[in-house]
Amino acid sequence: MLASAAPAEAAQPFIVADDTIQEVGGVVFISDSTSNGSRSDLLQQLAAQTTLGPYRFDIGPGRAMSRPGRTMYSGVEAVRRSREAGFAPTSFVVALGANDLKYGIRTPITARRTFDRLMEEIGPDCTVGLVNLYSTRPSFAWRYNEYLAQAVGRWPNAYLVDWAAVARRNRRWHRPDGFHMNLMGSKKKNTWIIQTMIAACVMHAQRTSGGTPA
């Protein structure tokens, strides 16, 4: 059953969860405002699809990977809160980083600590898709992507999800700030997010048993 809930906080995350068992699941998608476009379209797409479940979306504007913001808990805390809510999935997709560029991922040492903190919280038994960054404006997204690739190399249960390749081919999807999506881009990204979550579940099945989901 599709449900939306959020803890009582100054800036509440957008959380959507469904515990219905479908072809593939369970999986959590954790992100920031770059995935916070058309919520109504996301809900419509989720209601129409019959492949993914159980799942949980936890999207928090201003969210960084391991450092809590003034009004928003971190990606690490999002992992913890999912489990506290009774949902302990086998797969995660983490689409963060834009705010981490502000909060200190400037050196290999700080980047390693940040990524490793997230991966330690998730644990080695889960499969983790780490989404890279793209901006139509000059930024340090390339540096973040280098550190992300290094993290994937360190953690055998992590793999790269190449959003940058998709976004680079579709620059018209972006708002003027370079990172966020316009309405058309938000709808396209919603479709991509759902497909990426399904792919994460398939990846986990292949990684752990050499097969595909039942």
Image (cartoon, rainbow, N blue to C red):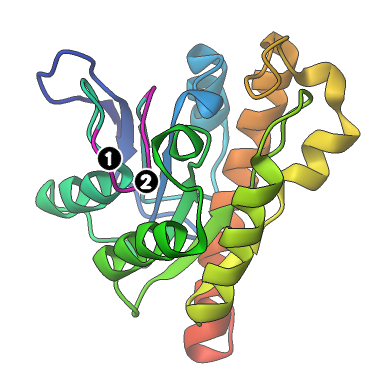
Q: Find residue 65 and name its label.
A: 2
Rendered image quadrant of residue 83 = bottom left
Q: Find residue 74 and name its label.
A: 1
Residue at figure coordinates x 78%, y 35% from the top left: 167
Residue 25 visible in rendering: no
Type of the residue with mark 2? Met
Q: Is residue 64 magenta?
A: yes
Q: State yes or no: discs 1 and 2 in contact (Cβ < 8 Å).
A: yes
Residue at figure coordinates x 68%, y 10% from the top left: 183
Rendered image quadrant of residue 48 = top right
- Residue placed most toward the observer, 49 or 185: 185
Q: Is residue 100 magenta?
A: no
Horizontal arrangement in the rendering, residue 179 relative to residue 96 (left or right): right
Give the spatial CA distance, label 1 vs label 2.
6 Å
Q: Which residues are magenta?
A: 61-68
Q: Position of residue 185 (x, y in %)?
A: 72, 20
Q: Main secondary structure of the magenta part?
A: loop
Residue at figure coordinates x 66%, y 41% from the top left: 141
Q: Position of residue 169 (x, y in %)?
A: 90, 35
Horizontal arrangement in the rendering, residue 53 relative to residue 118 (left or right): right
Q: Secondary structure at mark 1?
A: loop
Q: Residue furthest right?
A: 169
Residue at figure coordinates x 59%, y 40% from the top left: 193
Task: Please tell me which of labels 1 and 2 falls first in the chain.
Answer: 2
- Residue placed most toward the observer, 156 or 5: 156
Residue 145 visible in rendering: yes
Q: Find residue 20 and name its label.
A: none
